[in-house]
Image: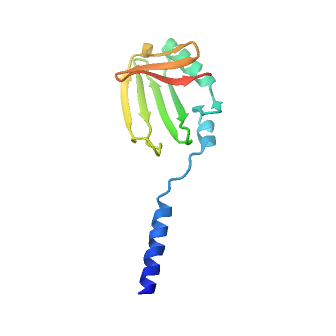
Amino acid sequence: MKRLKFIFIMFLILSLTSCKSASYNIESDINKGYVISGISNKHNVEKLDEFLFKVEQGESSDLTIVQLTKEGDPIYFSLSYSGDFIMYKYDNSKDKYGKSDITEEKVNKSDFYKNENKYYIKTSEGEVVLFDLE
């Protein structure tokens, strides 16, 4: 009986520790060229203006912005411009405290813009601040 109890406890411990997801690796996303907005750090910020310029010129372009939560979990905003519209994707599936939503929507190219120090996109849900330079 003691042996069965021991096996059960070991199984429970192994099950609980294997459920932990791997921690987020910011270096990997920086190397991919993603724009990163953390609490104390920002990376690849120049990619925002590059994407905006290409959209204004009618050139196809892709951009991924990662906003880090205060716990350090990534929330992804992906923009893909094909010449006609911007495909906008919101993905917070890696946020441990989020609802794990992934949504996609087509928006007009004029719906992505910069105003002072912030980059915005207008979606059917309203105006979203994608990045704050401050």
The residue shown at (65%, 32%) is 41
Q: Give the side of residue 109 with respect to residue 38, left or right.
A: left
Q: Position of residue 92 (x, y in %)?
A: 44, 38
Q: Position of residue 74 (x, y in %)?
A: 52, 39
Q: Nearer the viewer, residue 65 or 8?
A: 8
| Figure colour scheme | rainbow
Image location (x, y in percent) of residue 84: 40, 17
Q: Is residue 41 above or below residue 48?
A: below
Viewer-nearest residue: 78 or 94: 94
Q: Quadrant of the N terminus?
A: bottom left
| Residue ID at (59%, 37%) | 32
Point out the residue furthest to the bottom here. 1
* Residue under the image location 47 percent in, 31 percent down: 77
Q: Is residue 48 above or below residue 19?
A: above
Q: Is residue 80 left or right of residue 133?
A: left
In the drawing, does residue 128 fall left or right of residue 37? left
Q: Residue 63: where, in percent of width, then height?
A: 52, 28
**Residue at 50% across / 16% down in the picture?**
55
Q: Is residue 77 above or below residue 134?
A: below
Q: How many marks?
A: 0
Q: Nearer the viewer, residue 79 or 24?
A: 24
Quarter that holds the C terminus: top right
